[in-house]
Amino acid sequence: MPNYALEPVARAICARAGYDFGGGIAEGSFKETYLATRPDGVTLAVKVLKAGCSPERTDREIDAMKRCSHPNIGSFLELSAIEHASVTYGYLVEAFLAGGTLEDRLRSGLLDDADTLALGDALIGAVVHIAAQGLVHRDFKPANVMFPAPEAPAVVVDFGIVRDLQKTSITKSYLGMGPGTPFFASPEQLNNEKALIDWRTDQFAVGVTLSVARFGFHPYEEPGENVAQVIARVAGRKGPAARFREACAKAKLSVIERMIAAWPAERVRTPEALLSMWQQQREKK
Amino acid sequence: MPAFHQIGHDSENLLFEAELARFGGAILSPLNYTPEEVKAQVVRLKDRLGFVTVLDPHLYRPQSDRLCLPSWSYYPKDVDTADLGSGTWWAGLVDAVAASAVDVGPTAVCSPAIVPKVFSEDFYLDLVNNGNRLEAALRGTQVSPMLTVVVNLPELSALDRVMSIASIVSRCRTQDCLLVMVSTAEPRRELADPEELKGVMRLIATLEGGGQHVTVGFSSSDMILWKAAGATNCATGKFFNLRRFTLSRFDEPGGGGGQLEYWAEESLLAFLRQSDLLRIQARELLSDASKANPYKDPILSGIPDKKRWLALGWRQFMYWFAETEYRLSTGAVSAEELIRTADDNWAKVEAAAPPLFMEERQNDGSWVRQWRRALAEFPYFR
C-alpha cells in the first residue's frame, strides 16, 4: 500500500493554486503523485518531490524533461516549490494521463499485433528522441508508459533516474547494481557497468516491455522461473529463452530479439537504424 | 573489401608497382613523409578508380621517434609536457588532425590515439569521444572519419572484455574503424594464442555485425583469420611479414626494420629463409599461389643476392597478401581451406624422409594448428 506522507503538502499546493485536491495516485522512491483538477475542469497530476531525496537526481529529471519535447514523452506544465512546516518541497504539475498505464492495461490481457506495433512506434519514437538529447531514461517499463486517453498513443513518463551522458555519473561505482527496475533492466544496469550505459540500455528495456506486453513473459524467462531467477539470467547474460525466440519468429517481431541482446554491441547500433528496422518490420507484417 | 597498403619507411615506390595493383587502398604515413609528400601521393593515387587513401596521424606514442611528424601542423608542440588525460587537449588535437586531413585530401582520416599504459574503459570512452569529435569536424568535407581502436591483444582472451570493448566502440558515430592490436609477439613470431585470436575475431565480427566496417591494421598472414571473422579490409606493409605492432617497435632505430630476407609461403603459412625455401621447393611443397607470384623467378634466380632478395621478398609477401585477400573476399578460397592445407603440409614436413628441419627452430608450424583451432572454435566463443 502506498504511503502518502506528503498529502498535506499536496493539499497546500492545490489550495495555493486553486485546484481541487483529488487524492494520492502513486508513490515512488523520490516523489508522490496526487490528482488535482483545475477550475477549468482539466485534470492534473501534482508530483511532490520528497525532501532530501537526491537533489542532483531531481535536478537531472527536471532538466531532462525540459530538454525533451516529443508527443510520446510526458511533459510538465509547472515546476515550482512550496514551503510546508518549515521544509521546502519541489513539485511538478503535469497533465493527468487519464488512459492509465500500460501495466493497468495488461491486467486485462496481452496486446494484439496492431497494438504491439503502435506501442513499439511510440516507445521507439521516444527512445530515439531521448537518445538525441544525450540522455538515457533507464526506467522503461509498463508502469512508466501511460496513455492520455484509451485510444491515444503511449507516452513515456518518469525521468527520475535519467542519466545525462554529458555529465558525471551520480551512481557510485562500488555499488553492485545501478539504478533501474531490475525486471526490466539491462545486464549493464544490473551489473553497474557504467561505461556501457547508453541509449541501447533503453533499447533493452523497451524490448522487454514489448515482450511482456505481447507475449506475457520476459525474453530471458524460462517456463516456471521466478522474477529473481530471470534477473539473475539477465545479469549473467545467459541469453533469451527458446520460447521467446519462437514467439518472435511466429509473431514476425524479430527486431525485439535484437533489442534484448545481452551486450549493447549486439543490439541495434543507432537509434535511426532501430526506427528503420521497426518500420520495415511493420511493413512486412 | 580490398587489401590496404600500410605505407612505411621508404615504401612509396611500392604504391605504384604494377604487380601490386591489387591493393585497393593505402594507409598514408605522416611518420615517414611530410605533408607535401603525402599530398603528392594522394594526388597520384586519385587517378586510380575507387582507390582509398587513409591518413593515420600516427600518434600512438607521440614522444617516440618523431621522424616527419613535426612537419605536420597537427603535431602538438607540447607533446612532452601536455596532460594527455585532458579532454580539451585532445579536442584541439582532433580538430587539428581534421584540418590537416582536409588540406591533404585523403579519402579518410583516422582519429588520433595513443597506446595507453592501461587499456581501461575510460581509455575506450575517450577514443569514442575523439572519434565523434572527428566525425563532427569533418561534416561537410570530402574526408570521412575513421575511429582508431587500439586493443591489448592479451586482454582479448576474455569474452567479457571483448564484448565490453565492442559495446563502447560501437557507440561511436563513425562508420569505419581502424583496429590496431598491441601485442607482445617477438619479431618473426606468429600470433599463436587461440584464445586471443578468437577474441580478436569476435571483436571484428561483433563490430561488423553492428554495421561498422573494420580495417585491421598492421596485419600479416594472420589476415586470413581476420577475413574469416568478417573484416572489411586488412592492411599490411612491407615490414609486417616479420613484425607486429608492439611497444618495442617504437624503440627500434629509425630507418625502418625487418631487414631480413624471407619468403611468404602459403602452403605452410610461414615465412621461410633461403635454405628452407630451396628445400621446400625441392620437396615440391611450394603452393600454386607461390608459383604464380611474379616475384618468384626474380628471387629464385637471384639467390644468394641478399639485398636483392630483401627488396623482392617484401614484394613477394605483399603480392601474396593482396591476392589472398582478394581470393578470400571473392570466395575463391576459404580460410579453413588455407589453414587446413598448411596444417597437412606441416604434418608432411614433420614426417619427411630424409628429415626436413627449418633453419629457425621456432619455425615449426605450431601456430597453424592454433589458427585452425581458433577458426573452428570462434563461432562458439560467445
Image (tube, rainbow, N blue to C red):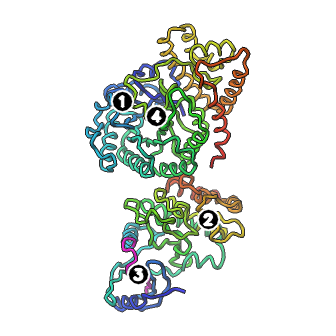
Q: Position of residue A254 (x, y in %)?
A: 64, 57
Chain bearing tag 2 is A
* Of marks 1 and 2, the one in the foreground: 2
Which mark is drawn over residue B75?
A: none
Inter-mark Cα distance, 3 to 4: 56 Å
Q: Position of residue B316 (x, y in %)?
A: 54, 19
* Of marks 2 and 4, the one in the foreground: 4
SS of the residue under disc 2: helix
- Name which of mark 1 and mark 4 comes first in the sequence: 1
When the figure is inspected, residue B274 is found, relative to residue B64, above or below; the finding is: above
SS of the residue under disc 1: loop
Are the two marked residues, 1 and 2, in contact with CB atoms closer than 8 angstroms? no
Residue type at the position of mark 2 = Ala
Residue type at the position of mark 3 = Lys
Residue of label 1: B31
**Is A219 left or right of A201, judged from the image as shown?**
right
Q: Which residues are magenta?
A: A40-57
Nearer the observer, A185 or B18:
A185
Inter-mark Cα distance, 2 to 4: 40 Å
Is A171 magenta? The answer is no
Is A55 magenta? The answer is yes
Are the two marked residues, 2 and 4, in contact with CB atoms closer than 8 angstroms? no
How packed mark 1 is, by other alpha carbons closer than 10 Å (few <14, some 14-19, many 20 or more), is many
SS of the residue under disc 3: loop
How packed mark 4 is, by other alpha carbons closer than 10 Å (few <14, some 14-19, many 20 or more), is some
Q: How many marks?
A: 4
Chain bearing tag 4 is B
Q: Residue at x 67, y 59 (%)?
A: A252
Q: Residue at x 40, y 88 (%)?
A: A10
Which mark is drawn over residue A50?
A: 3
- Name which of mark 3 and mark 2 comes first in the sequence: 3
Image quadrant containing the C terminus of chain A: bottom right
